[in-house]
Amino acid sequence: MSTELKNNLIAPCGMNCGLCYAYLRAKNTCLGCRCENKNKIFCQKCIIKNCVLLAQTTSNLCYECSKYPCTRLKQLDKRYRLKYKMSMIENLDHINRFGLDNFVQKEAERWECPTCGGSLCVHKGYCLNCEIIISKCIRPLKPVKSSLNNQIDSQ
């Protein structure tokens, strides 16, 4: 996959859409937050993606906004830090400091499954290709058993 395409997978909030379950799943996939998909209700309702101030930035990333980090981004960041052990604000700060290309390269290394080379899913906690469980979002532990797969999918 080209760097440009991977760069387009970084959402305005700093989420790497390439790690999102909606992007990685086999059916009814999402093409990422930067894709114009009028059929996806979630995208139409996203406060961050549709922010008037975001539209005034050159990068279309929240770190350039005069209100960065806004209340909505802080709430989203807190939820992701607690539930998925990743930070949108840290992602955006990294992009601001080192650039988008550097961030995409680091993300590719950080979230690559060491077993099959696929992308680890931040929302499910395992690689969707080979089903290796990840700890602290980036460290694989052991293969997922069928009953555990069903428990994770039902959550």
Image: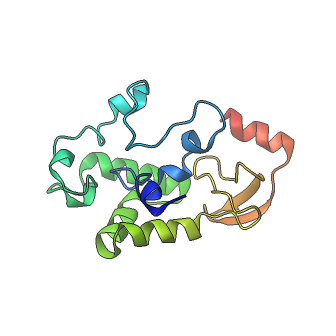
Q: Position of residue 2 (x, y in %)?
A: 50, 60
Q: Determine whether 129 is above or below 101 in the image.
A: above
> Residue 155 versus residue 52: which sits nearer the camera?
52
Q: Position of residue 24 (x, y in %)?
A: 61, 45
The part of the image, by quadrant, that contains residue 7 is bottom left
- What residue is drawn where x is 41% and y is 54%? 10
Horizontal arrangement in the rendering, residue 65 relative to residue 146 (left or right): left
Q: Determine whether 135 is above or below 36 in the image.
A: below
Q: Position of residue 155 (x, y in %)?
A: 65, 36
> Residue 20 versus residue 32: which sits nearer the camera?
32
Q: Quadrant of the N terminus?
A: bottom right
- What residue is drawn where x is 45% and y is 49%? 79
The part of the image, by quadrant, that contains residue 68 is bottom left
Horizontal arrangement in the rendering, residue 106 relative to residue 137 (left or right): left
Q: Residue furthest bottom?
A: 98
Horizontal arrangement in the rendering, residue 130 relative to residue 42 (left or right): right
- What residue is drawn where x is 54% and y is 54%? 84
Horizontal arrangement in the rendering, residue 155 relative to residue 93 (left or right): right
The part of the image, by quadrant, that contains residue 69 is bottom left
